[in-house]
Amino acid sequence: MVFSGLVFLFRFLPCFFIVYYLTPEKRKNLILFLGSLIFYAWGEPVYVLLMLFSTVSDYIHGIWIERYRLQGKIKYSRRILISAISINLILLITFKVPLLNLPLPLGISFYTFQTMSYSIDVYKGKVRAQKSLLDFGVYVTLFPQLVAGPIVTYNSICGELKCRSRDAKMLWQGLRRFIIGLGKKVLMANQIGMLFETLAGSEQISVLSAWLTAVSFGLQIYFDFSGYSDMAIGLGRMLGFHFPENFRYPYTAGSITEFWRRWHISLGSWFREYVYIPLGGSRRGKGKQMRNILLVWILTGVWHGAEWNFLLWGLWFAFWLLLEKALGHRFWKLPGLIRHSYTLWVTAVGWLMFAFTDWEQLALYLGAVTGCGNLPFCTGQVLYEWKNFSRLFPILIVGATPLPAQIVKNVNRLKEKTGDKGRQIGFMLEVLFCLAVLTGSVALIVDASYNPFLYFRF
Amino acid sequence: MKESKSAKIGLVIIAVWAGIIVLSDLLQQDRRFSENENRLLAQEPELTLTGLLEGSFMQAYEQYMSDQFIGRDVWIRLKTYGEKYLGKQEINGIYLLEGERLVQRMEPSFVTKETEERKREQLMEELAGLKQAVTGDCYLMLVPGAAELFRDALPPHAAEYDQKGFLDRVREHLPKDVVWVDVETELKKGERERLYYRLDHHWTTEGAFYGYQALRKAWGKAPAEPSEYVVEQVSEDFLGTLHSRLNLPMKGDIIETYTRKKEQSHRVEYVYEGVESSSLYEDKHLRTKDQYAFFLDGNHPLIIITTEAQHPSAEDASDETPFPGEERKSGLLVIKNSYANCLIPFLTEDYTTVYVIDPRYYHADLKRFVEEKKIEDCLYLYDVPGFLN
């Protein structure tokens, strides 16, 4: 089921929440688990068994890892850990490497990473093994973040698996966050995505069209993925969970290093915590650090898929990260404008590598954006499409900055000053905004010919 | 305290709005057919184990839910408004031109070179075969769509499929004994605003009249006199297929009929349906959404129209045919899509019998049909977008 579909919004979600809130506290996890299975089985009626297998396997592994660790038999504990990780990696590789041509189970890259973090944390003694199979099942299958993240590590929500506080304020914040995410996805990502599809499918490539392609894809994937994360975080909040933030205005970053602290944060910190730091991070000299960075970004690339273009994409970022490290303070002394432009340029070119799996097409586009493709500067098609989207673009660009959030904050401050009356008006505006976004999104979903989720592919 | 109270109000408002949508959607009756979109809607899928395991049930259910969703037409209208205010020059593949005129977009990628060539070759083969089967001549008439005539009115830099180029290529490859009907030149003599409906993809009866003139030219006959016809308005609220895709509030189109002042009597036989009528027009469709079906009752596999001049008096025998000095030919086969429906009434004046075949629904052997009926001439009539689709 997709969050931006009618079945989810007007069948699953209302039914689920009614049943969930009517159920007594003790049984809530059972409802959550069953609801998540239905949610997943709607899109993956067969692979739901794979996910259940993975759940039971990691549950048993976790218990044994802890048992041996507490008995002081670290060697055995380690072996069980290796077994747990191997099973996850085998699952991941079997389905992600196109050797066997199996269809990719939804969300497998996300839930295997979550359960690996669990096994490792149990091994390190950072968390206790989960004794309840149901609670562990809830963690793995939790429908808000099951299919496209954020990647929630076990230790960040293990407390909330047992007991969650919930009040009207939290519910409202969650609902608001969900609606905003829905709007980002349907009203913004899907719209600009149509521009990307038109341009990428066109035979007339020019310098401008290649740039517009890169920029529109960058905006689409940002609003698509961060919108999904918003919806996940919002739904989590409505259930009483606090998921980590996944995006912090990545396009405002002043360096590639900073970009990766703002883009898909949960994946970045996963690699940081479970690969980069265990390998020594930056503590074992420059040479080792370079190797670690290279390795992490190769893995980040291929995590998205076993295609060469994702590897290239990872290496592209590794190169600029290493360059920034090598330049050190000389880089940071550069004027902000230059650093920001450079960051946007690197990410935009990176998006082309990400978007095109076909080598020839990629080469053509890379030639066009670097100006060495011997292509015309502009075509009529670009001018025509630009006009179609010229009002949407500024909205999206402003939407990708903290400006809207800043305005809301200032209005809130104003509300405090004007007392009750101001607060009421401000709140009504907030509700009206949510109603408008929800209604507009439904209008677009009903007649949608184009409604993909980019991160379902990974 | 205050904050949690307002949070509750917000929750209730959104929940009520969502609840209204869900309940009214659940309680409403399913529709079989969308008048507005002029298509069958998906029905509730049957729940089967294999359907569940393969996921086909879920897909069908999603389609069903979207087709039957409460207030579907209103949602579509809302979406169109949004796109319009975002400055889109084209919505759902339709240009919005001045004077509430909608024109269907035909992108250059609409047909690939290979498809175009394949369709062209098939057409040539078919025409050559028909030419052999008929006793008289074979005519080809491809009508350019509105986008071609409104080219200079389209948004700047809009890339359109070159319909004229296509027509030139067809003409170039035409078998020598097939006659080309140059409808494009004739249409350009008219006022383009009156040739096509504003809100439908078909041409108007006036447009079809220009098409008829082009055909007369190809026959080597003098043009018909407009003054010989009575023009009658039969509807002024026709919201066509292009309108359905946007569903904005707009003033409807006018539908006209052209009738010869000299009265004729017709026998219209819908062969496959086993229905007979004495009129070329079916009024009942003017009360539905698809008013264009007024002409010859919409699309049918095979229609046979027989025409006689009414009360041929003995003393006025020379005036038996509608055009003085012309003889009514015996039979014409029209192979066509819906574009022909409003032109065929003109043809009944020149042929005693008109056989109308829509190959999308007629699957029997054409050649044999022509030979059995000893048909004299043949006319192949499509609009360019329709032909290439």
Image: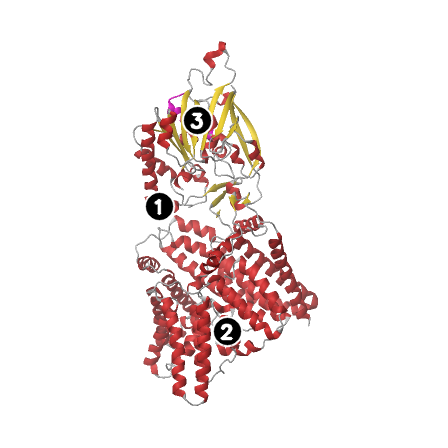
Q: Nearer the viewer, mark 2 or mark 1?
A: 2
Amino acid on which disc 2 is placed? Gly
Q: Identify the residue under disc 2.
A: A137
CA gap between label 2 and label 1 equals 51 Å
CA gap between label 2 and label 3 equals 72 Å
Q: Residue visible at 48% across and 59% down?
A: B49
- Is residue B217 located in the magenta-colored stretch of the structure? yes
Q: Which residues are magenta?
A: B208-221
Task: Give the chain letter at badge 3.
Answer: B
Task: Give the chain letter at badge 2.
Answer: A
Relative to B270, say whether A16 is above or below. below
Q: Is residue B119 visible?
A: yes
Examine the image and state in which quarter residue B154 appears.
top left
Q: Nearer the viewer, residue B127 or B85?
A: B127
Q: Is residue A400 visible?
A: no
| Image disc number at residue B354 | 3
